[in-house]
Image (cartoon, grey):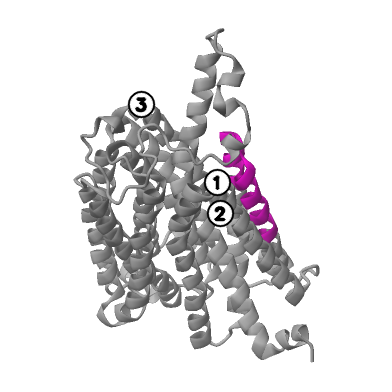
């Protein structure tokens, strides 16, 4: 028996499907976070190069041969030069915000806030648009063609990231990742649900698959920052492109995704679910908690560059405790929340996020930022791991127990958070400053938190209708 035949046996095929989905979620989320420490510094570098070119071109006494960065385009593609306000030697700690070198590029960095915010938000925006299309499409043609297409598109996106030297191409790469992310997440989770029919097995498989998501978030930012600092911009994206080729090849060998296999299930209509106040509360909690973390990811690196003279590797390392604490919290509260109440965990998680984000404005060095990022990751882990099961529970309790549509709403809530977070947070940070931005989103989370208490004992649909008739 050859290896491929053994892999296609029913017992092994489940594990192979799980491996494919694990790789898909790992790849999408690693690419999601790997750009966080790279893009702000890289955009600043290419903008400074363009500015220097423009200034030197106005001086006829300066010839192009005397300008080092005009001699080779590789400087732009693989620049590891440090912005003027940063030290060329990585420091072990952040400098004080009073360092005069940190303020020399404040105006330029404020402009980068907006560009970085739009770039980071584009992935979630495109994925938000693609989700309602990819979902019904999987019902018509099956999961395998969209899944393979997702691997192919994310390969294009990572390759484009690697070799792009303009903002427009970077924006295109990020948008392509949004389409790929929709294909990989919707089709991947559909494949798991279809393959693991037993509820207990399905839950365990989903947990393993989502550990790929968490692992991608854990290693993405530190991996990107260290590779960018010491190897260059191209290297981390080429490695991710290689992973995309491996995942796509494994999926193709197993399923030969060329045949259309229709999957059709009827459930509660989308509009009916969106009118359910309990589902709206859950979606709101997921949206606001993810919006907070998206604003932190988009605005924190530039704020650290301005006030702490943070080097490139530090811009990614500060997000490592964020991801680790998310992984810890999601595993702890995935089990514990069932005993103490998921509604209570979500309530305290949103309160913790509110207090943490407000505290960012008072951080003085990199160690404060690391501690606050750990608290932020823990809070989002509390909310995500408790609210996702509540979505399924509400459908069981109040609607037809078919879960695709309700989890599409949850994914849309995440996409809205990661779309509005950077796109709105960037301009706000540029106009009123990073501390005030964090205060605003912190207050929003604190004010929304009490609504989670309404999830204590949600009414069944029959009970709700009875109360309406009595009134």
Please name the residue shown 52% across and 86% down the image. 201
Above or below residue 405? Residue 357 is above
Q: Which mark is residue 297?
A: none
Please name the residue shown 22% across and 40% down the image. 96
Q: Which stretch appears magenta?
A: 150-174
Q: x%, y% of residue 342?
A: 30, 73
Left or right of 7 in this view: 61: left
Q: Which mark is residue 107?
A: 3
Whether residue 189 is visible, yes or no, is: no
Secondary structure mainly formed by the magenta segment: helix
Q: x%, y% of residue 142?
A: 71, 69
Dot 3 or dot 1: first in sequence order is: 3
User: Dots 2 and 1: beta carbons under 8 Å?
Assistant: yes
Look at the image and say whether residue 153 sits in the magenta stretch: yes
Total numbered badges shown on the rendered structure: 3
Image quadrant where one finds the C terminus: bottom left
Q: CA distance from mark 2 to mark 1?
A: 7 Å
Who is closer to the viewer here, 123 or 74? 74
Look at the image and say whether residue 303 sits in the magenta stretch: no
Helix, strand or loop at mark 1:
loop
Left or right of 348 in this view: 38: right
Q: CA distance from mark 3 to mark 1?
A: 24 Å
Mark 3 or 2, which is nearer the eye?
A: 2
Residue position for label 1 = 233
Helix, strand or loop at mark 2:
helix
Whether residue 164 is visible, yes or no, is: yes
Residue position for label 2 = 236
Above or below residue 409? Residue 41 is above
């Amino acid at each position: 028996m050859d290896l491929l035949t053994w892999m296609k046996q029913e017992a092994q095929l489940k594990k192979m499907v799980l491996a494919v989905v694990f790789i898909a979620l790992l790849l999408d989320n690693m690419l999601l976070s790997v750009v966080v420490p790279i893009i702000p510094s890289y955009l600043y570098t290419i903008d400074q190069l363009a500015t220097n070119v423009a200034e030197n071109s106005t001086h006829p006494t300066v010839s192009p041969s005397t300008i080092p960065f005009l001699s080779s385009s590789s400087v732009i593609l693989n620049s590891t030069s440090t912005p003027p306000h940063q030290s060329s030697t990585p420091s072990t700690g952040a400098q004080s915000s009073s360092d005069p070198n940190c303020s020399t590029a404040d105006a330029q960095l404020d402009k980068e806030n907006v560009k970085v915010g739009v770039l980071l938000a584009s992935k979630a925006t495109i994925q938000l648009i693609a989700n309602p299309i990819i979902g019904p499409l999987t019902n018509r043609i099956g999961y395998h063609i969209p899944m393979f297409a997702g691997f192919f598109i994310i390969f294009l996106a990572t390759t484009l990231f690697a070799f792009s030297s303009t903002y427009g191409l970077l924006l295109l790469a990020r948008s392509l990742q949004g389409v790929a992310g929709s294909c990989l997440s919707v089709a991947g989770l559909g494949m798991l649900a279809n393959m693991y029919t037993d509820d207990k097995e399905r839950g365990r498989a989903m947990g393993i698959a989502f550990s790929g998501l968490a692992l991608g978030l854990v290693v993405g930012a530190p991996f990107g920052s260290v590779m960018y600092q010491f190897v260059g911009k191209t290297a981390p994206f080429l490695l991710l492109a290689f992973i995309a080729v491996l995942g796509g090849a494994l999926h193709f060998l197993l399923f030969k995704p060329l045949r259309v296999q229709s999957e059709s299930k009827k459930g509660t209509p989308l509009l009916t679910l969106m009118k359910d106040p309990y589902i709206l509360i859950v979606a709101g909690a997921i949206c606001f908690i993810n919006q907070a973390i998206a604003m932190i990811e988009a605005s924190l690196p530039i704020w650290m560059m301005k006030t702490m003279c943070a080097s490139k590797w530090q811009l990614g390392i500060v997000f490592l405790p964020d991801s680790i604490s998310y992984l810890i919290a999601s595993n702890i509260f995935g089990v514990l929340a069932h005993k103490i109440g998921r509604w209570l965990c979500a309530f305290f998680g949103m309160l913790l996020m509110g207090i943490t984000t407000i505290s960012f404005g008072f951080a003085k060095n990199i160690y404060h930022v690391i501690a606050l990022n750990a608290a932020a990751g823990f809070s989002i882990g509390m909310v995500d791991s408790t609210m996702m099961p509540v979505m399924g529970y509400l459908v069981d309790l109040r609607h037809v127990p078919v879960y695709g549509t309700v989890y599409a709403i949850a994914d849309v809530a995440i996409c809205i958070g990661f779309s509005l977070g950077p796109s709105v947070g960037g301009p706000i940070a540029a106009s009123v400053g990073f501390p005030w931005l964090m205060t605003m989103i912190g207050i929003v989370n604190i004010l929304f938190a009490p609504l989670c208490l309404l999830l204590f004992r949600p009414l069944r649909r029959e009970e709700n209708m009875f109360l309406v008739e009595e009134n």
